[in-house]
Amino acid sequence: MSFLLSSLITLGIFQQQTVPELQITSQVVNQGSSIQLNGQPWAGRWLRQGGQFFVEENWATNALGISFLPDQPNQPNNRQRAKWFSSPQFLPVTFATPANYRYVALPNFSPNWRVSVRGDTLQIVTPPAKLVAVRSSKQAWGDRLVVELDSPAPFQIQRSANGTVLVFHAGGSAELARQQFSGMVVSSLRLQPQSTSTVLAIDTNSAITPQLDTLSNPYRLVLDYRISPPSAPSRSDVTVKVWASGIAVIDQTIAIPNSPEQFRLHALEVDLKQVGLVMRPMWSNPVGMFGTSPLKAMAQLWQATAAINAGFFNRDRRLPVGAIRSEGQWLAGPALTRGAIAWNDKGAVLIDRLSYTEQLELPTSQVAITNLNSGYVQRGVARYTSGWGESYLTMTDNEILVLVQNNQITGQFQAAQAGQSQIPIPKDGYLLVLRGVPELVNSLAIGTPVSIKSGVSPASFEQYPHIIGAGPLLLKNSQIVLNPAQESFSPAFAEQRAVRSAIATTKAGKIWLVTVNASAQNTLPTLSQTAQVLQQLGAVDALNLDGGSSAGLYLGGNLLNRENTSAIHNAIGIFLHSPASR
């Protein structure tokens, strides 16, 4: 058990329970990827198993408005606690194969729901409902809005440029929101009846996400717009949900010691010793190192259950500039001495600063290799193997390309402008790229025998088949060891505030995939504050990953920390099955 979960148990926030075993659907009578809700088409996965309909968990939240609640002590196995205009219910949970999406049983909140299948579309029709009242009030902490209905109805909530938009599958009159309201957060309300729904537009004077709850007797949707959180995080600021065997979801507001600042933390606790659960590097283009894509698209391409963005890359060239090693093969080598994480399939993990060197051995001399399979360009000799892709496209002007096959130089080629020459990379050798060092051409004549000598430091990295490089290193043995300059990061990078991604180990030998988002006051964390947050949570070793617009945490089809990420090059994927060969 991790330090974080142990602490929560001690505080009474979360009590130890039997972890749900992963249930893989063995027989699916019907399944599809489209759902029609009251005549409106949705993209949503569904399946029918044992006479019961299951819908993708994220669709149930986004389309129906169902709230999934934190786990409780002694919660039944394979059940998810849910709430929708009622007291909490326990919904059965299942997974299809591969287990990259989680399904919950379509809840029977109303006996009058009609569910049918037409082709590959699941059709859901809910009973007619009507908005009864819209009330608003000022509170000491902000503004509260209450929408009352005569019966439960599906609803969707979206952020808009000016606030929040709610869409109810219910009738309503514009007169319900005629009253003027100017609160501390909410500036105006507008109710817009549609043919089959009602839209409530809530304008706010600041970007605050409301806290939402549904109640019964009478049926109400309550939205609380809080200007600021409590002065110190309370028990309600931490939620833990066991998503599947070996994966727990943690959502927490955490304060920095001796500071008024608080940050929102989203995390996955992953047990790499769990049978059937593996962690792998992922990259955007399955056949090479060129390319970028959003984290969600990458995770779905690889059929990953969960993922977090990982190493740095050149956004213009769309190429990696840090280490990527998978199944013992260097797909991209570390260009600088920077923090990295390494692991094997037995659950062993190493986080430390990684240095990698290569030398080209000639009959009478040696030549230092500056980069292996890297988009990081510098003067010297770089080496590209088939792990980079089928071919190499020149990155700088006047590069000299030297072909090596079966440990012998077999060709030379003088390139011209960058991006104009592309040459195949031999599977039985590699390509040497000379940048700004024409004096080495004569020593690399055709027919010359060559070999490669390489080494890593610390040497313990060599025993791990999977490595991802990023940086800087944040924690080592529970102590903050942040030193951006030592890892060749600029002062501006070290001092800037941004959304952060990190990966850390726990005292229980588990892994945390973590994003640290802005505080309630929209203050973003620094690297130092990120290190303090992870130290406070009880992390042992921790590594900063690429952050800012790249920072994303993915689980079961959705991002947990934001709506989308910018295009990224690589990520760390969690699989509840062996990942597809790439």
Image: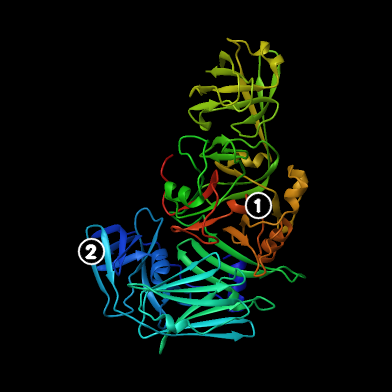
Secondary structure at numbered mark 1: strand
What is the quadrant of the C terminus in the image? top left
**Mark earlier in primary sequence (1, 2):** 2
Give the residue type at disc 2. Answer: Val
Pick whichever, 173 or 340, lies toward us.
173
Residue at 58%, 73% in the rendered image: 204
Q: Which tag is nearer the camera, tag 1 or tag 2?
A: 2
Q: For the residue marked with disc 1, what is the amino acid?
A: Leu
* Residue labelled with disc 1: 543
In depth, the one of 18 and 159 nearer the eye is: 159
Which quarter of the image is occupied by the N terminus?
bottom right
Residue 568 sits above or below residue 166 on the image: above
Q: Position of residue 406 (x, y in %)?
A: 52, 18
Residue 372 quadrant: top right
How far across and how far down the image is residue 202, in percent? Answer: 52, 74
Q: Residue furthest bottom?
A: 217
Q: How crowded is mark 1: few (under 14 residues within 10 Å), some or many (20 or more)?
A: many
Q: Is 115 left or right of 83, judged from the image as shown?
A: left
- Label 2 CA crowd tier, 10 Å (few <14, some 14–19, many 20+): some
The answer to whether the residue labelled 1 contacts the one labelled 2, judged by CB atoms less than 8 Å apart, is no
Q: Distance between the residues labelled 1 and 2?
A: 48 Å
Q: Which of 475 and 274 is in front in this view?
A: 475
Residue 429 appears in view = no
Q: Residue 462: percent from the left, percent from the top?
A: 61, 38
Please name the residue that numbered disc 2 is placed on.
Answer: 117
Q: Which of these two is toward me, 562 or 201? A: 201
